[in-house]
Amino acid sequence: MPADAIVATLRVGSLAGVDPDTRLFPFEPVPAECFCAECKAIFTAADGCCECPTCGTISRELGQGRELLLLSLQLA
Ligand SMILES: [Zn+2]
């Protein structure tokens, strides 16, 4: 089966280690989010940095950003 007969849609976290510029397959990027225990708030972890932008606490709870999920797979 030729590769172009397969249509896959993936959900890829920004910390999953996938090059965002890859054009091998389409994917839905997921920004990394952390939970700050001090602020009781979720914040976007820009560049994989888990430092709370409000209070500066380093978060140890990653809510999302490492996933690599296959959402759909279509075989032509
Ligand atoms: Zn905080």
Image (cartoon, helix red, strand yellow):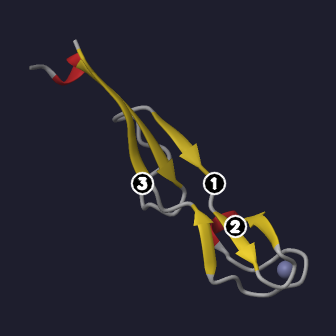
Name the amino acid, label 3.
Answer: Val
Quarter-of-image position of residue 26? top left
Question: Residue reaching furthest left?
Answer: 1
Give the residue number, with chain letter if any, for mark 1: 31
Mark 2 and mark 3: span between their CA atoms? 16 Å
Q: Which residue is mark 2?
A: 45
Instruction: Give the Cα distance between marks 3 and 1.
Output: 12 Å
Above or below residue 2? Residue 66 is below
Apparent side of residue 62 relative to residue 24 in the rendered image (left or right): right
N-term-proximal mark, 2 vs 3: 3
Question: Eyeballing the image, is 29 above or below 34?
Answer: above
Of circles 2 and 3, which is in front? 2
**Residue that appears at 18% across and 24% down:** 3
Q: CA distance from mark 2 to mark 1?
A: 7 Å
Secondary structure beneath disc 1? Answer: loop
Name the side, left or right, on which 15 lies relative to 74.
right
| Residue kind at label 2, given as amino acid type | Ala
What residue would you read off at disc 3? 18
Task: Check disc 2: other Cα within 10 Å, few if <14, some if 14-19, many if 20+.
Answer: many
Q: Is 54 in front, or is 17? A: 54
Disc 3 packing (10 Å; few <14; some 14–19; many ≥20): few
Q: Residues within 10 Å of mark 1 (few under 14, many from 20)?
A: some
Question: Residue 42: image x %, image y %?
Answer: 77, 66
Rendered image: mark on residue 11: none
